[in-house]
């Protein structure tokens, strides 16, 4: 049986964590993979959104069809995990020539025939060819990812919120087993059935990246230079993207923090909670939400009593901010690691 | 420095305990009282210490012989049982002869010989065992039980606060924020102070937030396969500065239940709490005392913010709490999650 083995040190496990957000460039690539899977008939069912994505496929994205063979692996330089599209495209654009050459020639060895002229130029670091790739990613993103991004973020954050308590009470061992049937923690490392290989993580740990669009088996992007993170991509929802939160009868595509939060808490209190995504004093909070300071203070008290926000005092001034639970409620993880806040 | 070495398996099996342990809290309350007496510092009004001194039962005095102000303390206080009687049953079943070393340890930093009854305890004398059990039960009843709601709130609030840190930063980040003296370094955990090196045995470390404890994090590295190794830390404000603990007055009158009603309205809060056990719409309506149409409407609102989820089973639906909903109620899941979510591949 084919088995890939990922060896973890204790430090690698201690640095294994969820990605704070979905990555637009990677999701664009994964939609490419879903489209190719659909064309090859390997996808079990084709959802409406995928048919729509196929219809919206822009001409300028066609170079990606040359670059990416019908099945993976694909060249690593396209795996940008930046949470922002512009930043992600900048990373692709900045790929050194040596990396382009080695990854493209390695990848082409898996295919028949010679690469087209423009791909050979790309391997030489030709700027125009690099721009062709960046434009293809950008346009494909705008056509198929961007219109679905709000729903994608909801799916991403809901998946992380669902997994967090599993990690807390079961450890990574339980978490990996629950993520996908092909994954299993066994004797100081992770097994992934389905392909062969053995990989070390170089003390960098592993970033867990639930993908709202991907429906296939878990994918790995393993750092070969110790500079990029090791990433495990898995399907955020077993049946794939639904264009809305994965609820049985939720007709809206509202992200959490939209109207559904207002329906739960009332519009004003929901606005107060959302306004505290950035820490604020009572008067500032009142100004942002458009209520009186006395009312802001009252709402803050109710939210504080259930641990959705916390209030610290600096002298006579109170400062309100979201707690971890509050962030989870809004579907957000702490954006930056916070040291020494205990 | 205390150094605890982890294998990769140990990190992968490190987890939070699912509920506060009454026996552990009872033992730590006693230690807390002793420390407060030693420190001779000011005990703030509203501190649980003042009330505990007033209510300290005479029958609990034998514990003063067993629990000094500093560790090590005998292992038998470590029971994680969520119920006090169950924990006391475990104490009764302790093979005392194995604990003889422990018991003399507990006496190590004091002058003179342990009292006769402690030596008898080491011989497994039943009367001495009953003395300990009664002392623990009475101390629990007088000092811990009246504050148990606060203990639970502090426990769950602490875990709710830690979970996202663990998810976003890994155990390295989690340990770095549990206490200023803890730090993940290379393949293990360092705690400043006291020189000692311990190895975990591959079954991980259980993390225990304690409401009564306000001192430095305590390691209990187990050599017994039946008992997991654990790290106990202060759930207070996590700063372990020795001032106050999570059981002090200001938390005692604060309960998640009432706060939830203020947040969601009494009916919707009741709906959420009723779903601590999964229920169908009609059953839910019956439990809360509202119409099925109203129950269905409340369920919809709660579902859309991921506090509950609804599964269809033929023509019936079944509502249950999501992970977020459980966290909101201050509960962690107790069941294993293995294999949920995905169908066969």
Image: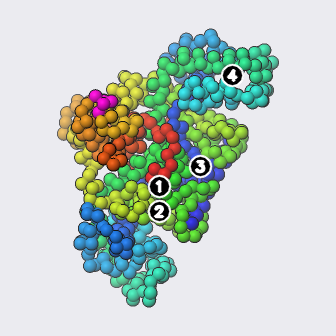
Residue at image position (35%, 41%) is: A320
Hey, which quadrant is residue B280 in on the image? top left
Q: Is residue A30 shown to the viewer in this render?
A: no
- Number of numbered tags placed on the structure image: 4
Magenta includes A213? Answer: no
Residue B117 image point, x, y percent: 38, 86
Nearer the camera: disc 1 or disc 3 = 1
Hey, which quadrant is residue B95 in on the image? bottom left
Hey, which quadrant is residue B9 in on the image? bottom right
Q: Are marks 1 and 2 in contact (CB under 8 Å)?
A: yes
Lower sequence index among marks 3 and 4: 3
Q: Is residue A342 shown to the viewer in this render?
A: yes
| Stretch in magenta | A286-290
Q: Secondary structure at mark 4?
A: loop
> What chain is tagged by disc 2?
B
Q: Find disc 3 in the rendering and name its residue.
A: A13
Q: Are marks 4 and 2 in contact (CB under 8 Å)?
A: no
Picture layout, residue B277 above or below residue B75: above
Residue B4 vs residue A93: left or right?
Answer: left
Q: Distance from label 3 to label 4 (Cα)?
A: 32 Å
Q: Distance from label 4 to label 1 (Cα)?
A: 46 Å
Q: Main secondary structure of the magenta part?
A: helix
10 Å neighbourhood of mark 2: few (<14), some, or many (≥20)?
A: many
> What chain is tagged by disc 3?
A
Q: Find disc 2 in the rendering and name its residue.
A: B217
Q: Distance from label 1 to label 2 (Cα)?
A: 9 Å
Q: Which label was assigned to residue B178?
A: 1
Q: Find disc 4 in the rendering and name its residue.
A: A68
């Amino acid at each position: 049986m084919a088995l890939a083995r990922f060896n973890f040190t204790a430090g690698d496990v201690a640095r294994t964590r969820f990605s704070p957000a979905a990555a637009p460039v990677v999701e664009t690539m994964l939609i490419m993979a879903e489209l190719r899977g659909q064309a090859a008939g390997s996808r079990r069912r084709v959802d409406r959104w995928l048919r729509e994505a196929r219809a919206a496929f822009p001409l300028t994205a066609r170079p990606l069809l040359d670059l990416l063979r019908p099945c993976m692996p694909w060249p690593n330089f396209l795996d940008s995990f930046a949470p922002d599209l512009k930043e992600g495209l900048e990373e692709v654009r900045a790929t050194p020539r040596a990396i382009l050459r080695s990854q493209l020639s390695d990848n082409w060895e898996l295919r028949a025939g010679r690469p087209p002229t423009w791909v050979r130029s790309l391997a030489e670091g030709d700027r125009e060819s690099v721009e062709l790739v960046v434009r293809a990613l950008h346009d494909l993103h705008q056509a198929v990812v961007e219109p679905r991004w709000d729903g994608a973020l909801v799916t991403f954050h809901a998946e992380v919120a669902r997994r967090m308590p599993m990690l807390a009470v079961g450890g990574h061992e339980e978490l990996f087993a629950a993520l996908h049937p092909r994954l299993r923690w066994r004797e100081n490392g992770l097994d992934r059935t389905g392909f062969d290989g053995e990989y070390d993580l170089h003390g960098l740990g592993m970033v867990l990246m639930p993908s709202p669009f991907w429906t296939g088996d878990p994918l790995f992007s393993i750092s070969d230079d110790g500079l990029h993170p090791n990433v495990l991509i898995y399907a955020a929802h077993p049946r794939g993207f639904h264009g809305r939160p994965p609820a049985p009868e939720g007709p809206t595509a509202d992200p959490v923090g939209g109207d559904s939060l207002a329906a739960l808490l009332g519009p004003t209190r929901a606005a107060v909670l959302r306004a505290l995504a950035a820490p604020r004093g009572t008067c500032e909070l009142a100004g942002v939400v458009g209520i009186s300071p006395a009312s802001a203070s009252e709402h803050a008290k109710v939210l504080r009593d259930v641990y959705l926000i916390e209030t610290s005092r600096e002298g006579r001034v109170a400062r309100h901010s979201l707690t971890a639970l509050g962030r989870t409620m809004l579907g957000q993880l702490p954006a930056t690691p916070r040291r020494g806040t205990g | 420095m205390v150094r605890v070495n982890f294998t990769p398996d140990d990190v992968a099996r490190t987890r939070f305990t699912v509920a506060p342990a009454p026996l552990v809290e009872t033992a730590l309350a006693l230690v807390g009282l002793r420390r407060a007496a030693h420190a001779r510092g000011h005990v703030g009004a509203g501190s649980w210490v003042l009330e505990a001194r007033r209510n300290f039962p005479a029958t609990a005095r034998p514990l003063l012989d067993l629990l000094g102000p500093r560790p090590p303390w005998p292992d038998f206080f470590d029971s994680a049982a969520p119920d006090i009687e169950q924990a006391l049953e475990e104490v009764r079943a302790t093979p005392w002869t194995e604990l003889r070393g422990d018991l003399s340890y507990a006496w190590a930093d004091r002058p003179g010989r342990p009292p006769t009854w402690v030596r008898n305890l080491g011989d497994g004398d039943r009367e001495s065992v009953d003395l300990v059990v009664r002392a623990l039960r009475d101390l629990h009843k007088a000092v811990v039980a009246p504050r148990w709601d606060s203990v639970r709130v502090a426990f769950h609030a602490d875990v709710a606060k830690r979970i996202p840190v663990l998810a976003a930063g890994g155990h390295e980040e989690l340990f770095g924020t549990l206490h200023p003296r803890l730090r993940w370094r290379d393949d293990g955990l360092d705690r400043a102070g006291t020189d000692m090196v311990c190895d975990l045995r591959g079954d991980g470390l259980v993390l225990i937030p304690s409401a009564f404890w306000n001192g430095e994090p305590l390691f209990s590295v187990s050599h017994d396969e039946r008992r997991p190794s654990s790290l106990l830390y202060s759930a207070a404000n996590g700063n372990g500065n020795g001032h106050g603990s999570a059981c002090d007055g200001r938390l005692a009158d604060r309960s998640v239940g009432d706060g939830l009603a203020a947040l969601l309205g009494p009916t919707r809060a009741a709906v959420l709490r009723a779903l601590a056990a999964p229920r169908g719409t009609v059953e839910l309506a019956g439990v809360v005392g509202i119409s099925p149409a109203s129950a269905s409407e409340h369920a919809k609102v709660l579902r859309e913010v991921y506090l509950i989820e609804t599964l269809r089973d033929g023509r019936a639906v079944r509502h249950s709490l999501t992970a977020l909903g459980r966290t909101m109620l201050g509960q962690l899941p107790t069941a294993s999650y293995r294999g949920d979510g995905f169908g066969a591949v």
